[in-house]
Image (cartoon, rainbow, N blue to C red):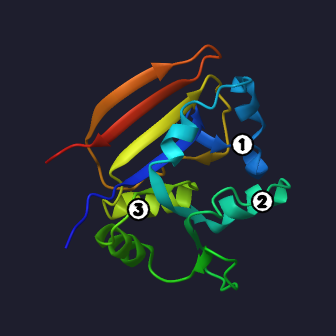
Amino acid sequence: MTTDRKVIVYIATSLDGYIAKPNDDLDFLSIVEQEGQDYGYADFIKTVDTVVVGRKTYDKVISMGFDFPHADKNAYIITRTPRPNIGSVKFYTEDLKALVDKLKTEKGKNIFCDGGAEIVNELLKHDLIDEFIISIIPILVGNGTKLFKDNRPEQKLELISVKSFEKGLTQLHYKRAKN
């Protein structure tokens, strides 16, 4: 049985393809901050009920003094180290492909992949990402954590939309091309 649930990567990157500078520095994201502008995030998040995120990304959010923003959803923190679950936040230590395959057969809204790069690239290896919504931040950071790692399968995409914003952010929305 299949459902229409899609795995969607919604993420920001520098123009040169980095989602973080060295030492997981995310300061460059602030150059596009604008009061009242969330770049479509609120509308997007209404379309998902499940979030898959890497443990390093989860820990980074928590270390910044925030509560985990997706605690109201079914959240899977992908980790190698078991931890007790916190409400709907599950620390998942098993096979990521098996988890996503299972989630895609269940009824529900879309599945949001919130990073990080290791999770995105593992999903790409198994052709499990249906759409990408990538916000390009107008900066070349030169070094850090690349969104897309080398040595992964080629994947053709179809453009859904391009939006540009006042602060220079450009948002690209692609879906996996039909073969």
Q: Tell me which numbered mark, 2 or 3, is placed earlier along the sequence.
A: 2
Count neighbours of disc 3 (C-alpha within 10 A) and say few if under 14, some if 14 to 19, many if 20 or more.
some
Residue 114: x and y in percent read 56, 54
The amino acid beneath tag 2 is: Asp
* 3 or 1: mark nearer the eye: 3
* 2 or 1: mark nearer the eye: 2
Residue in the picture at 57% in, 30% down: 39
Count neighbours of disc 2 (C-alpha within 10 A) and say few if under 14, some if 14 to 19, many if 20 or more.
few
Q: Quadrant of residue 167?
A: top right
Residue 171: x and y in percent read 49, 28
For the residues labelled 3 and 1, the Cα–Cα distance comes to: 22 Å
Residue in the picture at 75% in, 56% down: 61
Residue 100: x and y in percent read 39, 70
The amino acid beneath tag 1 is: Lys
The amino acid beneath tag 3 is: Leu
Numbered tag placed on residue 123 in the rendering: 3
* In the image: residue 175, left or right of residue 95: left
Residue 16: x and y in percent read 56, 31
Q: Nearer the viewer, residue 38 or 168?
A: 38
Q: Which residue is mark 2?
A: 67
Q: Tell me which numbered mark, 2 or 1, is placed earlier along the sequence.
A: 1
